[in-house]
Image (cartoon, grey):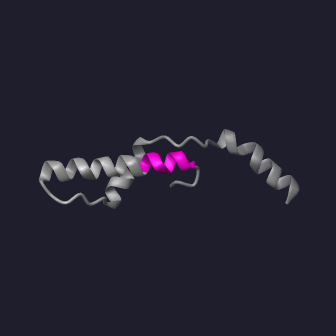
Amino acid sequence: GMENASGSDMAAVVSAAKRSALGRAIREDAEPIITAEDFDEARRRIPLSITEEILAPYKKFMEERF
């Protein structure tokens, strides 16, 4: 999932998926079409920058205040 993704993480995943689709299009001499598999592969390769350690203080704040 992308629930712990920052905006820059999402942009990196989209860019990686785009590069994958373009590479495939060049190899196969076809139209570049980004597939769900391109996004899945990119998501597996791109580490997300928002960790549970970063989220913990915010979760604690939410539990105490709301």
Q: How many marks?
A: 0
Residue 43 shows in the view: no
Quadrant in which residue 39 is drawn: bottom left
Locate residue 53 relative to residue 11 in the image: left or right. Answer: right
Residue 51, x across and y down, in percent: 61, 41
Locate residue 60 relative to residue 42 in the image: left or right. Answer: right
Residue furthest right in the image? 65
Residue name at image x 15 percent, y 58 percent: 30
Residue 57, x across and y down, in percent: 77, 43
Residue 35, x across and y down, in percent: 31, 60
Locate residue 12 relative to residue 25 in the image: left or right. Answer: right
Q: Is-magenta flag for residue 21?
A: no
Quadrant in which residue 29 is drawn: bottom left
The span picked out in magenta is 5-13
Quadrant in which residue 32 is drawn: bottom left
Residue 66 shows in the view: yes
Q: Is-magenta flag for residue 10?
A: yes
Residue 65, x across and y down, in percent: 87, 56
Residue name at image x 58 percent, y 50 percent: 4
Q: Quadrant of the C terminus?
A: bottom right
Residue sitting nearer the eye, 8 or 65: 8
